[in-house]
Amino acid sequence: MPSVRILVVEGHARRRIHELKLERINLGRMESVEGRGSQGMRRNHVAFVDRDDPVNGTVSRAHAHIEHFAAHGFRLFDDGSAHGTR
């Protein structure tokens, strides 16, 4: 599993630089979020601060995730966020 470095360039996250070595990396607002239905708790590895500003206000609690695939590398997926993922 290769590592990935994520740099937060806009908005306010718990940390600006994240170096992770995981198959799935969750991104969203707040570090821990209660899942819908039977999903349980979700841990956001890249956690934006829960505040209403022009950037953080567009980040959903369970916004997106990054997955690593051996054949394709890293891919970004939207997790049903209100404002989409770019």
Image: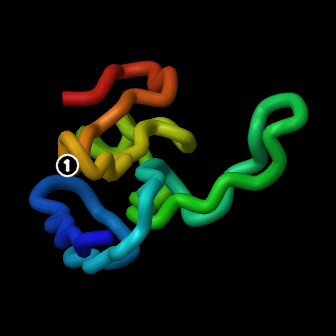
Residue at the disc numbered 1: 73
Instruction: Identify residue type, mark 1.
Output: Gly
> Between 19 and 81, which is closer to the camera in this rendering?
19
43 left or right of 4 in image: right
Query: At 32% from the left edge and 51% from the top edge, which residue is drawn?
Result: 68
Identify whether 21 is placed above or below 59: below
> Residue 45: image x %, image y %?
46, 66
Left or right: 9 with respect to 25? left
**Residue drawn at (34%, 66%), measured in percent from left and top?**
13
| Residue 22 spot, x, y in % from top left | 42, 68
Q: Is residue 51 visible?
A: no
Estimate the x, y position of residue 47 in percent, counting from the top left.
44, 62
Secondary structure beneath dot 1 equals strand
Q: Residue furthest left?
A: 9
Q: Locate residue 74 relative to residue 14 in the image: left or right.
A: left
Badge 1: residue crowd in 10 Å (few <14, some 14–19, many ≥20): few
Q: Residue at x 77, y 54 (%)?
A: 41
Way the structure is coloured:
rainbow
Quadrant position of residue 43: bottom right
Up-down relation of residue 25 to residue 55 (above or below): below
